[in-house]
Image (cartoon, rainbow, N blue to C red):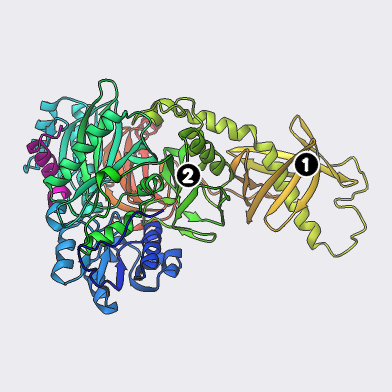
Amino acid sequence: MNNIKNSPLAPRPSLLTLLIANRGEIASRIIRSCKKMGIKSVAVFSEADRNAPFVAEADTAVFIGESSPNASYLNQDKIIATAKKVGADAIHPGYGFLSENVSFARRCEKENILFIGPNANAIEQMGSKSKAKTLMQQHKVPTVPGYQGSDQSADTLKKEAKAIGFPVLLKATAGGGGKGMRIVHKEDEIEAAIEAAKRESQNAFGDDELIVEKYIASGRHIEFQIFGDKHGNAIHILERECSIQRRYQKVIEESPSPILTEELRTQMGEAAVNAAKALNYDNAGTVEFIFDDTNQDFYFLEVNTRLQVEHPVTEEITGLDLVQMQIESAMGLPLSITQEEVKGAGYAIECRLYAEDANNDFLPVTGSIHQFDIPQVEGLRVETAIQSGSEISIYYDPMIAKLIVWDNSRQAALRKMQYVLRNLVCLGMTTNQAFLLHLVQHPDFLPGNYNTHFIQNKINLDDLKAQQNNASNLIILAACLYDWNQREQKRTLLRSIPSGWRNNFNNYQQEAYKVNESEQTIKYRFLQNNFHCLIGEAEYNVQLIQAEENQIRLEIDGIQHKFTVVKNGTDYFIHNENIGNIHLVQKERFPIKEAEKIQGAYEAPMPSQIVKILVEAGQAVKAGDGLIVLSSMKMENTISATEDGIVEEIFTQEDTNVEAGFLLLKLKSTQNANQAT
């Protein structure tokens, strides 16, 4: 369904070629609307994205630089030069990167290239959260108490934080997505938090300005999609509930919000439209509110002057094409839908599939997606940047895909989402897929009883580990019999002799595997098309029903199970709808000498860039002191000392890239040194 029509009030300007100054799934999304509108799409790509799906999907693709965003997607000179080279009439910045960069919007205007987004003045006013907050206060939109002044000295920020009262929230005035944000609970934490937030904001957005706000410990994050045109029209296109977050990154979004009444929806929608009108807003944007469901108060947070990651849920319930609306508004066409005509039908829910390890503090991971298969479900929409064989690098956001489902009711949509998360095959690396399923099955999430602290307060990751450990035997059976079948298919000699034949039939064949740090051995023997298997105290009778290249179907004690198996050396990546995606490692038959563990060694937990070295050789440190700041997938992590000690040697330097396991530095324990003397 599409409610957008060409307006008879104005001639349609000529737009034949559009350059997309972005990457991944949002580039693919923009390309689809371009094709629908008969507009030629031009993708730009970095070295890391040379073989990415969006590059192949575009009508034309141009290489613009190395993998680092500063050398490619954030390089205005290269993007403008490329637009001129290919004769682009317009540039769509997507979200992130240059999408809210006012200098880029103005440069496009100067170069006579249409910028697909709001006018530069609106971006400038909203590009700074401090200016945005001041403007909203002037227009009677309720705001969170805080400081948004021009004096950005550490002393002033500390003074204002103390005046507001802890806990406070430090927030970068530029950009979004949780970059440059820190919750500060105590006064002695404020200085380090200011430094880290400024550095992260500078790296992500080229601007280190911060605002300080009173931290609302319990609330819901509700945002309204707004749209304006160049004829003074402004509307909202309903709300999205975005309260399920971790590290300020949204994980699940849905529309409509399960908490809003029609009266509240009207009040918040009117506030959002007033904000748009105050800006003379003329494209897609989002007004974000923090909503206190204990007293029904809501406060303005910010305006995102771009398309949001979660825009598909709005499209699904309204039938609108927001990208097409963006393009047409930028071309000068008036909105062809009024506020009264905006209607939502049914429910839409989006889950963000990330390359991250929920069992390791949600740290991002890198690697290869060996197999990516999407289940066939009516009402499912998948926005993704990858395919089977894609690489997940350290340079960009770790989001793999957005999974969106629509149905007539929230209950039906949740049921579909659970089915999708059980049956999506994403093998080759750790993802948050099992974590997402755990979330949408939680008894408090099902009725919509949650807030922005739901994950940290309600989700027990030990339960998730226990579920996987309980299912480890089935995964071991699948890995073992998958290998057995592979060997059988390759066997050319003495095929009449049963597999694994030996003089003493009572002896079992056996294999050892490591699953979730636990090592287990399976013993098995094959007779009359049946396997008798032993794993610890458990005994199984198994039939191999069907085997294909990457799939195997087993009947285990009378119940049939289907497994997808990808093997890479001794690593097995296995999916089953009742178990999820599990990684196990086959133990070598002959022991491999392990590398000697260096006492006091600190290694990179993931592929990273060294942002800042906080210590120097010979320096004494206390347990908890920061040692090195790493950046991976646009997020910073600090390696801290686990004990008191003295820095013996540093093996890296700033602005270098390191692999996971790289030795960063060596610390001599003060306790061991004292014992030695």
Which residue position holds label 1?
555
Residue 572 position in % (x across, y down): 63, 50
Q: Which residue is rendered at x = 29% and y = 78% of the image?
A: 86
Specify whether residue 149 is painted magenta: no
Q: Name the element at disc 1.
A: strand
Residue at the spot of label 2: 405
Question: Predominant secondary structure in magenta?
Answer: helix
Q: Which residues are magenta?
A: 124-142
Residue nearer the viewer, 431 or 559: 559
Q: Nearer the viewer, residue 341 or 32?
A: 341
Mark 2: amino acid: Val
Q: Which quadrant would the C terminus be assigned to in this image?
A: top left
Find the distance from the CA under tag 1 to the CA under tag 2: 32 Å
Residue 424 against residue 673 in the figure, above or below: below
Is 317 drawn above or below residue 231 in the view shown? above
First-in-chain label (1 vs 2): 2
Q: Are marks 1 and 2 in contact (CB under 8 Å)?
A: no
